[in-house]
Image (spheres, grey):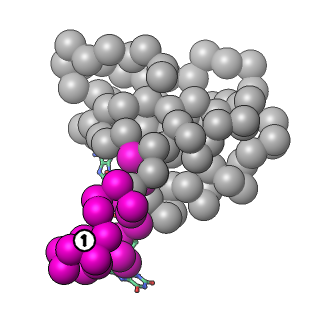
Amino acid sequence: MAKAKATERNPHVVIVGAGFGGLSAAKALASKPFEVTVIDRHNYHLFQPLLYQVATAGLSPADIAAPIRSIVRGRSNQTVMLETVTSVDVAASEVDLPPGSSLAVM
Ligand SMILES: Cc1cc2nc3c(=O)[nH]c(=O)nc-3n(C[C@H](O)[C@H](O)[C@H](O)COP(=O)(O)OP(=O)(O)OC[C@H]3O[C@@H](n4cnc5c(N)ncnc54)[C@H](O)[C@@H]3O)c2cc1C
């Protein structure tokens, strides 16, 4: 099983999910002495409260989805990974990813 593990000098914070919670955490950690990796199974943040507007054809899907990379752009301590996390081993400080997946950071 592929694993993403901290190797940087600063403490490595892995945020699983770029929803409101994950993006709020990432924003709070911008310019702080941490290496931050935001992992999401999608490459976009979905603004869920406006889903009904898409369902009723008031908006297009692109209007309520924003690329995660564009949101964190400019934060030198943050990278984004498109991946599905399968489990988290807190004791080992490891985030498990599907077998065979690439660990390349976008
Ligand atoms: C139709 C609708 C309308 C809503 N309207 C309102 C409203 O008016 N006001 C309000 O306050 N709240 C509203 N909510 C609720 C609000 O959207 C949620 O409370 C909020 O999005 C939760 O944020 P979150 O960060 O916890 O999770 P989410 O926003 O669900 O984000 C989770 C993220 O984690 C990613 N993810 C999940 N599992 C994995 C994994 N294993 N590996 C990698 N990535 C993963 C997902 O792709 C997603 O990007 C609404 C929700 C819906 C569905």
Task: Quickly name the residue at label 1.
Answer: 54
Asked whether 61 falls inside the magenta stretch, the response is yes
Q: Position of residue 80 (x, y in %)?
A: 50, 32
Task: Tell which quarter ligand 1 is in.
Answer: bottom left
Q: Is residue 64 above or below residue 7?
A: below
Q: Position of residue 67 (x, y in %)?
A: 45, 44
Along the line of sight, the residue nearer the viewer: 34 or 66: 66
Residue 102 shows up from this direction: yes
Name the side, left or right, on which 14 lies relative to 52: right
Q: Residue at x 52, y 37 (%)?
A: 69
Along the line of sight, the residue nearer the viewer: 20 or 95: 20
Q: Is residue 57 above or below residue 9?
A: below
Q: Position of residue 7 (x, y in %)?
A: 61, 16
Q: Which residues are magenta?
A: 44-64
Q: Is residue 68 above or below residue 63?
A: above
Q: Quadrant of residue 23?
A: bottom right
Give amino acid for label 1.
Val
